[in-house]
Amino acid sequence: MIETLLAAFPYVKAAIGATPTEVADSEKLLGIHFPDSFRRYLTSFGYLSFSDDCELYGLGQGVPKYFDLTRRTIEERTILLPNIPTYFLPFLNDGSGNHFCVDLRRETPDPPVVLWHHEAGTDRSSNFVIESFSKFLVELAKQAPNRRLERP
């Protein structure tokens, strides 16, 4: 479904996609199970860049080291304060230290996206953004500069 949705807005840069082993290794290290839509994003693209200031974390060959999903998630959960809870999966930094996250509390194939505010305090740290990860990707693609999908 993600591939079909993004095909309508193909102005993005992508890697080649993560292998099932890379995805499973990341899940094990993070102690979570990726929702179906997020897993499809990782295996289909590995990483997406909609512009220089809008690059999603990912896995696999061709993903810039700084955007490695596993590394960034562990850092956000353990090193950077306040720690992002384990029920949020950060995938996009807004440039100010806040993160768009997949909300893992709802066990659905295509869960909602929230914005984690690092300065708001743990009692009011997130805001609902959109009802599904797939729809979030489509909205980003609609706003992307006019360039075709590029793969290495």
Image: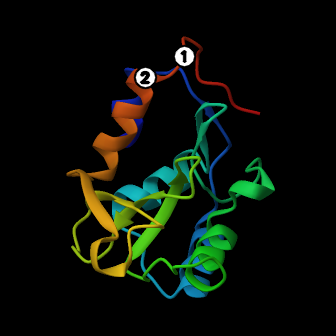
Percent across and percent down for residue 112 are 25, 58
Percent across and percent down for residue 148 are 58, 16
* Quadrant location, the N terminus: top left
* Quadrant location, the C terminus: top right
Q: Amino acid at mark 1?
A: Pro
Percent across and percent down for residue 55 are 60, 42
Percent across and percent down for residue 9 are 42, 21
Seen at 47% across and 77% down, the residue is 84
Q: Examine the image and state in which quarter residue 5 appears.
A: top left
Give the vertical position of 42 relative to 135 (above or below). Answer: below
Residue 108 visible in image: yes
Mark 2: few, some, or many residues within 10 Å (few <14, many ≥20)? few
- The residue identified by callout 2 is 143
Name the foreground residue: 144 vs 109: 144
- The residue identified by callout 1 is 145
Seen at 43% across and 23% down, the residue is 143
Secondary structure at numbered mark 1? loop
Name the foreground residue: 55 vs 96: 96
Q: Amino acid at mark 2?
A: Gln
